[in-house]
Image: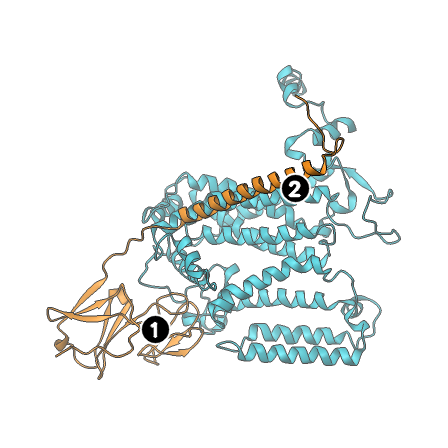
Chain colours: A orange, B cyan
Amino acid sequence: MALVDDLEHPPTSQESARRRFLAAVGGGALGVGALGAAITTLRFIEPSVVYEEDKRIAVGRPEEIAVGTVLVLASGKVYLLRTEAGFIALSTVCTHLGCIVRPEAGSGGFACPCHGSRFRAEGTVRLGPAVRELRRHPISVEDGLLIVDAGAFTEDRAAFTVPA
Amino acid sequence: MSRLLDALTRNRVWKSIVRHGYPDTNKNRTLLVFSNFFLHAHPVKARLRAFAFSRTLYLGGLSIGCFALLIITGTLLMFFYRPAVPQAYHDMKDIEFVVFTGMFQRNLHRWAAHAMVALVFAHMALTFYRKAYRPPREFNWVIGVLLFVGTVLLSYTGYLLPWDQLAYWAVTVGTNMAGATPFLGDWIKRLLLGAGRIGESTLIRFYVLHCVVLPLAVGFGIGLHIWRIRKDRGIYLPPRPGSVESSGDEPADEPTAMTFPHLLLREGVAGVALTLALSLGALLADAPLEDIANPDRTPNPAKSPWYFLGLQELLHYWRPSISGVLLPVLTLVALAAIPYFQINLDRRPLWESPRRRTLARLWAAIALLTALFWKSGAHPVWAIMVPLWGIGVVMSLGAFVQGKRGAARAIRERSLPFWIFTWFLVIVVVLTVVGTLFRGPGWSFVYPWRSGLYL
């Protein structure tokens, strides 16, 4: 096999152009292939199916829950309040970085054990670093039972009232 | 005895493995270093000044020593650990109470990890102050910054594995922080969690990162780091008084010494001292293991390990996209950029410029920064403002002190980047100390001498 060194035998300009073209095509194909492999690998790592269990909680008959009652559901992850206006299901997952806030002695609100955010009893922010109020779970009534869906969140700020 | 040694070494098998004679001549000592795979990162002779403990405090070498201990103890722990829920936690209990010397191995692994974080950080600080990132070593400094990131990520992925309360909530906070990244946040978070929330799929992901991906990356990075030091003719040494600094060869009168025995002996002693110190720590103090992870209840206070408490303290002030993403990324970019802007290298003392104007500018800047750190967060950031004022006062002394020696001269001759970097170091220390000792339930400020320690 004979090897031709490009430094000893410089190619003609036409040959150079041909080589540059082939190098661009070959390099481009390699680049596209590598990009495709990278994207495919990332997509491989990304979960395709996420298992989520049903987290609906049947609380009981709404008429048996007196105004002013606070019920602690889901091992403390949901606080169900019955106010004058109706039912509110507060999530105790801190809107800052996801720790579970706890009732704070004195203020009647909640305190986060991780970064010190403070929330009022109805979930609005009293002290940072959190900026968003505590999230709320959707409430419904099925077969006369009050249902709180602890697996979903609602942007609805109005308290839930049982439809007549 | 010597006949036994002779019998062992005077045969074809031995000579085929060790292809040089007994190291009792300089030729054999040269061959010993030169032809040995495990020693080939060393030169045959090294400059005497590079040996001195006081020059480097052996911080880089000790970091590598920690890494080696971590690989050994980590591999041993893998024999008993299953990355599954709830087996992971039960296996930890087994390692602690059933496995022979299991408690010791786990303690050693934990304390070596803590030591490595501290040593790598100290190594970076000393490299800055010694100005050892001078060209042509710029990129090796960048590799060093990346190795620091790798070290921190190794620690972080490591402490999810016990599946205790600390693990669970640290990863909740960490992944939510990653989720605060602009645009890519949700995607990164899902990639880390392997699901919508922390669970078994998160555990296996962190396990693979901790035991395979990150050790390989950091191990490769260490190799590259050392290789580049070797190609740059060893560690940076400042020019000796009287000799001109040149980018090329060392001055001929630079004293050197044989790597065998002098350098290898020092490395060996340092390695043994590190192993003994960490082993003693592992015998005296047990690595913490909290209750099994409980997604329904966050411990109060929920504190990360000490090297993340500075970051946790930062998160108390600004929103996660700032405290957890912007500030760390900016800090790392600023650190990596240091050598490319010749920072702190031209040594122009701050007080060389007109004194009155410099003072006015300095305190205007301090006032501006004070306003920023007072108002921008959810609470005034004392842990950043007080060090700022302290450094400002010490800096300003340089405009007034007259002495030609000692501290007075040192204060007068420092450059502005020196002070900024020092401010950064002091902030890191103060934030960490505040987060560790002065924070109690609900992350409220407490005095440890009144209410005790919350660790």
Where B419 sits versus A8, above or below? below
- Marks 1 and 2 sit apart, C-alpha to C-alpha, by 57 Å
Q: Chain of mark 1?
A: A
| Tag 2 subunit | B
Q: In percent of the image, x 36 and y 64: which residue is there?
A: B298
- Disc 2 marks which amino acid? Val
Q: Quadrant of residue A73?
A: bottom left
Residue denoted by label 1? A134
Answer left or right for B49 relative to B218. Answer: right
The residue carrying mark 2 is: B269
Q: Position of residue B82 (x, y in %)?
A: 37, 43
Which quarter of the rendered picture does the N terminus of chain A lie within? top right
Most distant residue in the left direction: A143
Can see residue B432?
no
Q: Nearer the viewer, mark 1 or mark 2?
A: 1
Task: Give the image location of residue B125, x and y in percent.
Answer: 66, 58
Is A92 in front, or is A53? A53
Q: Amino acid at mark 1?
A: Leu
Q: Element under label 1? A: loop
Q: Foreground residue, A159 or A41?
A: A41
The front one of B196 and B292 is: B196
